[in-house]
């Protein structure tokens, strides 16, 4: 699955924006967003290059959804159901009340929209499962589903196991929906927060990230086929190295998780115990309950990790984004006193994906995807905020603005979007072969 996402990003990131006004010529993720192309010399674009204005979170969410969902479900799924991404977003906006099965008569507007989106997505996935059954059984699935060759091995194997167990396509669709939601609900907002935090911290951090990741995000510019007609840049991402060999990027990723996620762990108490309150130890003999909490056998305990992640006793300037917070530096193993310092990442007590047997099984995939998205976008594109005085919902005084939080699944969504201008970075042309 990871290799499929990386291949998809290698193809999609060079076309993050198309600089086309016509929706016919735009990418699928541009068509559903408010993008505007500014020609050279027009107001706000004194350069000789094309510029696209867009709402960063909306564009990024659609872009990541197309890349990841196509890698998982195959291209025909979104081609036949272009609104599936919007349905997933509607479900995410009311995930908590939807999961709690709050009655429809409770006046929560987003809850009604989420229920309708869930029904549409269930029907969509049922049709897709029926088409897979026909295709795998050697029958004609119909013209619209004639190309299912790029469905991921994960989904094909899952369909096979469910079918062998006698599970109907409609019931399999419910399992597919859970997987799609997990794939989309956290990676998009986390990529947004990480990219925004890096950009907002300043040009120095952006430059350092680009330098650190350059060996593992190989960007090149093919020579033009015809005079005056440039080809899109080419990209080759080494996702494993981004995670293992880029401590600054990895530290920024953990810091964005610390500030912009609210994971919740549930634990079942198997025997009576006293939990210290964090302000001193409990004596073995006195067991003073004023200094702790008595947990009875059979209780369920909810652990909101965001309280720990923003505790000023554990994190210096806990409300601030500090890019190097999780970095540690040590001398390289060498007898030479001039041996260079080596940087690595230490999470210490930071547990954004839970711990123990309940730790999120998709944590490594999520990390790989987010690091690859952000590093590749920074490699090929320049982003700048739009000044609020121009009447856009961007920044005040020409500086980046960090939106307030809105509750999502585990990662917060931004309360409002950020309007940005996007320009293609100049990449050195590749030599003619």
Image (cartoon, rainbow, N blue to C red):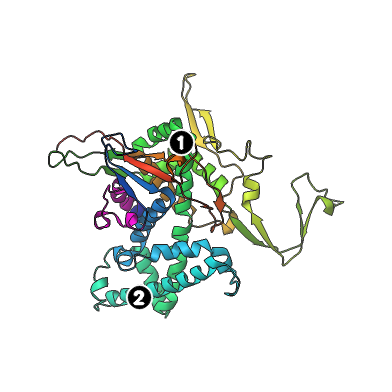
Residue 340's place in the image compared with 256, above or below, is above
- Residue designated by label 1: 398
Residue 160's place in the image compared with 318, above or below, is below
> Is 30 within the magenta?
yes
Pick whichever, 263 or 228, lies toward us. Answer: 228
Residues at badges 2 and 1 in contact (C-beta under 8 Å)?
no
Q: Residue 106, position in %: x, y? A: 61, 71
**Residue bounds of the magenta highlight:** 6-32
- In which image quadrant can residue 155 be found? bottom left
Pick whichever, 351 or 414, lies toward us. Answer: 414
Q: Main secondary structure of the magenta part?
A: helix
Residue 276 relative to residue 396: left or right = right
| Viewer can see residue 165 | no
- In which image quadrant can residue 83 be found? bottom left
Q: Residue 221, position in %: x, y? A: 23, 38
Q: Secondary structure at mark 1?
A: loop
Q: CA distance from mark 2 to mark 1?
A: 48 Å
For the C terminus, the image quarter is: top left
What residue lies at 87% left-to-right and 51% top-to-bottom? 286
Crowd around label 2: few <14 · some 14–19 · many ≥20 (10 Å):
some
Q: Secondary structure at mark 2?
A: helix
Instruction: Please tell me the numbered disc located at residue 127.
Output: 2
Instruction: Please tell me the numbered disc located at residue 302.
Output: none
Between circles 2 and 1, the one closer to the viewer is 1
For the N terminus, the image quarter is: bottom left
């Amino acid at each position: 699955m990871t290799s499929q996402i990386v291949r998809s990003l290698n193809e999609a990131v060079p076309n993050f924006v198309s600089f086309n006004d016509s929706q016919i010529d735009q990418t699928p993720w541009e068509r559903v967003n408010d993008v505007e192309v500014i020609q050279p010399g027009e107001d706000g674009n004194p350069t000789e290059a094309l510029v696209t204005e867009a709402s960063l979170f909306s564009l990024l969410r659609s872009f990541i959804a197309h890349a990841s969902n196509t890698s998982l479900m195959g291209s025909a799924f979104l081609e036949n159901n272009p609104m599936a991404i919007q349905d997933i977003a509607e479900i995410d906006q009311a995930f908590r009340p939807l999961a709690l099965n709050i009655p429809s008569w409770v006046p929560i507007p987003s809850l009604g929209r989420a229920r309708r989106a869930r029904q549409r997505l269930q029907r969509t996935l049922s049709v897709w499962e029926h088409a897979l059954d026909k295709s795998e059984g050697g029958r004609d699935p119909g013209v619209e589903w004639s190309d299912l060759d790029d469905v991921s091995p994960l989904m094909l194997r899952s369909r096979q196991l469910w079918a062998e167990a006698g599970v109907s396509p409609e019931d399999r669709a419910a399992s597919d929906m859970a997987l799609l939601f997990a794939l989309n609900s956290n990676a998009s907002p986390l990529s947004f927060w990480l990219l925004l935090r890096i950009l907002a911290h300043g040009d120095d951090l952006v430059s350092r990230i680009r330098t650190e990741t350059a060996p593992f995000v190989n960007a090149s510019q093919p020579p033009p086929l015809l005079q005056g007609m440039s080809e899109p840049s080419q990209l080759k991402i080494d996702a494993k190295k981004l995670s293992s060999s880029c401590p600054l990027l990895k530290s920024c990723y953990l810091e964005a998780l610390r500030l912009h996620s609210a994971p919740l762990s549930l634990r079942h108490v198997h025997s009576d115990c006293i939990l210290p309150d964090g302000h001193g130890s409990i004596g073995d003999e006195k067991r003073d309950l004023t200094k702790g909490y008595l947990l009875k056998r059979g209780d369920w305990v909810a652990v909101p990790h965001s309280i720990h992640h923003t505790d000023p006793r554990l994190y210096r300037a806990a409300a601030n984004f500090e890019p190097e917070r999780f970095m540690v530096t040590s001398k390289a193993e060498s007898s030479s006193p001039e041996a260079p310092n080596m940087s690595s990442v230490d999470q210490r007590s930071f547990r954004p994906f839970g711990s123990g047997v309940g730790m999120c099984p998709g944590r490594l995939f999520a990390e790989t995807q987010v690091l690859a998205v952000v590093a590749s976008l920074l490699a090929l594109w320049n982003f700048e905020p739009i000044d609020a005085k121009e009447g856009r919902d961007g920044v005040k005084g020409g500086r980046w603005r960090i939106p307030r939080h809105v509750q999502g699944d585990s990662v917060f969504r931004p309360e409002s979007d950020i309007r940005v201008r996007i320009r293609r970075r100049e990449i050195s042309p590749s030599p003619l072969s």
